[in-house]
Amino acid sequence: MKRFGLSTGRVKLRGLVEVRFWRRQTKFQGFNWKSHEQHQKLWNFLGTKIPEIAKSGFSSVWLPPSYDSFSPEEDELRTLLHNKMKQYEVRSMADIVINHRCGTTKGHEGMYNRFDVIPLAWDEHVVTSSLGGLGNPNTANKLFPGFPIIDHTKKFVRKDILNWFRWLRYDVGFEDFRFDFVRG
């Protein structure tokens, strides 16, 4: 298949997902640092811009982390992914942050290291002890200043993340993933 003169291929990873790849890809960043304040408006706004984005030759749109994209704006996100982006053959790329996460609630030592009101509802035991959590010491090369580092040595954390990936891919409809701060 050729699109915009780009060759495509497919790879299957452990039966989890079929990955399509572009040999050359042009990614459009569809958000900025303030986008989290207006997700619902962002999804609708991007929906109006997808024809122009496609016409300009972009093969995918990199979308912000979808932690806050559950309701009511989940419907707008799904409309963007399933209707507009598919119609114009523009792939959706989710920004995935699994190394560090800003907590939703203060926990151990008065730090924001609890995640109470989001689908991956974890307590301080998933945060490394390096940054005020009750988990294992940090195994990463670096710390991400100001954000709790997730303890990936815990089996349930890895399981929860894989289930979250499946939900994002098969239920919400993201086609690609971009991993944030993977050297961390």
Image (cartoon, helix red, strand yellow):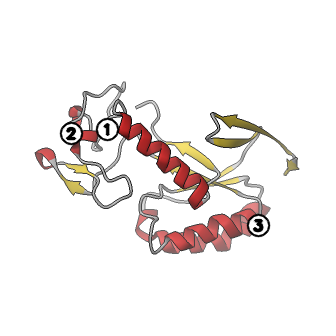
- Examine the rendered structure and indicate whether residue 62 appears above or below residue 178: below
- Cα distance between the residues tagged 1 and 3: 38 Å
Q: Is residue 29 visible?
A: no
CA gap between label 2 and label 1 equals 8 Å
Q: In the displayed structure, would residue 165 be above or below residue 12?
A: below
Sequence-wise, the earlier of marks 2 and 1 is 2
User: Is residue 122 rendered to the left or right of residue 14?
Assistant: left
Residue 173, labelled with which disc? none
| Residue at 73%, 52% in the rendered image | 59
Q: Quadrant location of residue 70?
A: bottom left
* Residue 171 against residue 9 in the figure, above or below: below
What residue is at 25 percent from the left and 27 percent from the top? 137
- Residue 81 spot, x, y in % from top left: 64, 64
Q: Earlier in the sequence, mark 1 or mark 3?
A: 3
Local secondary structure at mark 1 = loop
Residue 149 disc label: 1
Q: Give the quarter of the image for residue 106.
A: bottom left
Q: Residues within 10 Å of mark 2 (few under 14, many from 20)?
A: many
Give the x, y percent position of residue 94. Answer: 55, 52
Type of amino acid at the residue the image marks with label 3: Gln
SS assignment at label 3: helix
Q: Is mark 2 in CB contact (under 8 Å) with mark 1?
A: yes
Q: Quadrant of the C terminus?
A: top left
Residue behind mark 3: 87
Measured in 3D between alpha carbons, the distance from the residue under mark 2 to the one under mark 3, in whole angstroms, is: 45 Å
The residue indicated by pointer 2 is 133
Query: How busy is the neighbourhood of tag 1: few (under 14 within 10 Å), some, or many (20 plus)?
Result: many
Earlier sequence position, callout 2 versus callout 3: 3
Q: Position of residue 126 (x, y in %)?
A: 28, 40
Look at the image and tell me whether residue 87 can be seen.
Answer: yes
